[in-house]
Each structure stands twice: as structure tokens, then as C-alpha cells.
Image: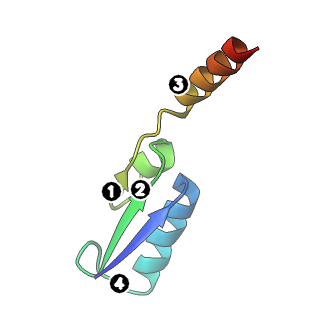
Amino acid sequence: MSLFIALDQIAGVLALNKALQLHIKIPEALQLICYSNGLLSYYSFLKMSVIDQHSKEIGKEGVHQDDESH
């Protein structure tokens, strides 16, 4: 079994489509994890495992910490 970790939902969907084109059985032969929880991963034909990074909250916290350091 192989594992593919996609850094965004576009890479995840592309990997999923290519695996299907190559007749790779998912999840038996390939497991796919996507670092995104957007609409593309939500509406994919086969559901991907996703990691929701809460990027907006992380960005706000980064700005808040930067403001405090000045």
C-alpha cells in the first residue's frame, strides 16, 4: 500500500484522478491525505481524508503575535 500526502486540494484531486486513470484501487492500494478542507475535496467522487489547518485562524494569530512583538 502507498500513501500520497497532498499539500493542497488541487494536488489532492489531481492525484486522485490520476490514480483512477491508472486503475489504482483506493484505498486498498493507495491512501490519499489532503492538507485542505475546501470545496474540491468535499465534492470529489471518492472522498479524500483531509486535514483542516484552520489557515485563517493561524494567519490571524500570526498577525496578533507580530503586533504584540512591536
Q: Nearer the viewer, mark 4 or mark 3?
A: 3
Camera-near label (4 vs 2) is: 4
Q: Nearer the viewer, residue 19 or 63?
A: 63
Labelled pair 1, 4 in contact (Cβ < 8 Å): no
Residue for badge 2: 44
- Residue sitting at 53 percent across and 24 percent down? 57
- Asked if 64 appears above or below 26 in the picture, the reply is above
Residue under circle 3?
Answer: 57
Badge nearest the viewer, 1 or 3: 3
Q: CA distance from mark 4 to mark 2?
A: 16 Å
Query: Which structural element holds mark 3?
Result: helix
Report if the CB atoms under discs 4 and 2 are less than 8 Å apart.
no
Q: Earlier in the sequence, mark 1 or mark 3?
A: 1
| Label 4 or label 2, whichever comes before in sequence order | 4
Give the SS element for disc 2: loop
Could you say whether the residue bearing mark 1 is in a helix, strand or loop? loop
Cβ atoms at labels 1 and 3 below 8 Å apart: no
Return the disc, 1 or 4, that comes first in the chain's sequence: 4
> Which picture quadrant has residue 29?
bottom left
Q: In what quadrant of the picture does the C terminus appear?
A: top right
Nearer the viewer's eye, disc 2 or disc 3?
3
Query: Can you tell which mark lies on residue 24?
Result: 4
- Image coords of residue 37 (percent x, y): 44, 43
45 lies above or below 35: below
Amino acid tagged 3: Glu
The label shown at residue 47 is 1
- Separation of marks 2 and 3 at Cα, in angstroms: 25 Å
Q: Spatial distance from mark 1 to mark 4, Cα to Cα?
A: 15 Å
